[in-house]
Image (cartoon, grey):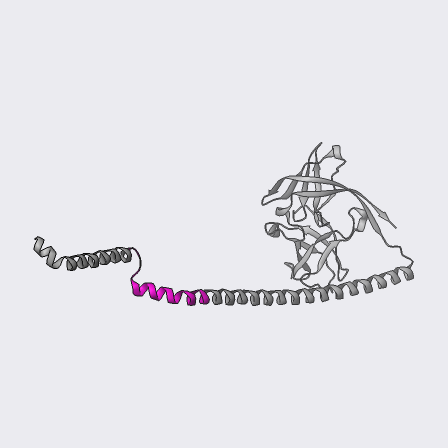
Amino acid sequence: MKKFLKDHGIWVLFAAAVISVALAAMSFFSNTSSPLVNLAGTLSSPFRSAYASAAAWFNGKQAYFKDVQALEAENEALRKRNAELEAAARQAEKDSQENKLLRERLNLREQKYELELESAVITEHTVTNWTSSLTLDRGTVHGVEAGDCVVSSTNDLVGIVSEVGSNWCTVLTIVDTDTSLGAQVFRTKDLGLAQGDFSMMGEERLRLDFLPADCQLLGGDLVVTSGLGGYYPSDLVIGTIEEVQKDESGSASYAVIAPAADFDALSEVFIIKSFDIVT
């Protein structure tokens, strides 16, 4: 054995060194990638970074152009709306001047209303086959009386007070079958009677009856209170005309009105306790 080590010791050491290096290399590469994969990954890493940067830049530009297009479309819509409003304002100014001239020629004075309002909260909304009503938290102690008008915050007519307690009242909405009031088509000035109808109450619609035979109404025409008789203020918005139909006899026309007030969305209303005409 000694002779073998003496004659071949250097080769044994060399072989041991080679084996040690091989084992170390195997241990290292078993926990990392193979040399070729590692080299390929190292070489491609800058290209992957460049591609990622380019993709991010392209996506950003694409989103930017989409935003620009959306803004341009929105601006165009706003320009058209602005033009429409300007035209409407000019027409309103023209109508106001014509109205003023006619009043001067007829020696009429412009009428305005001073309204005494009482705000009220809706505590109950009742809808059945026979009635459509609201219960409010205001009554006689607040100066509320039967026959008072009830409007929304935008002066859309909601209904008429039908019954009053000390701190509550019942309001029949304008679609209730017991509600009727004088009405006027704003555009044509045609007069009629707006009233509830059993067949329409479930759809929250009402009728405009007793129209002139030659009336030329259009869908979308605004209907307001006429104020005739002095029971209710004039120009309270009732709703808009949906369609004109013939009655069962076929000899007279009536219009279907969609109320301006959304009864289901209301939580607060205003009771008109009194109104005075101011000239």
Image quadrant assignment for residue 191: bottom right
Q: How many marks?
A: 0
Q: Measuring 23% from the left and 58% from the top, which residue is drawn there?
A: 22
Image quadrant assignment for residue 15: bottom left
Determine whether, in the image, residue 82 is placed left or right of residue 72: right
As drawn, 209 above or below 67: above
**Residue 223 x %, y %:** 72, 56
Q: Main secondary structure of the magenta part?
A: helix
Determine whether, in the image, residue 34 is placed left or right of residue 258: left
**The magenta stretch spans residue 46:** yes
Which of the two residues, 125 or 116, is positioned nearer the viewer here?
116
Q: Measuring 69% from the left and 43% from the top, which residue is drawn there?
A: 269
**Residue 1 x %, y %:** 7, 53
**The magenta stretch spans residue 103:** no
Q: Measuring 88% from the left and 59% from the top, which residue is drawn there?
A: 103
Magenta stretch bounds: 31-51
Q: Measuring 9% from the left and 53% from the top, which residue is drawn there?
A: 2
**Residue 130 x %, y %:** 61, 44
**Residue 122 x %, y %:** 65, 40
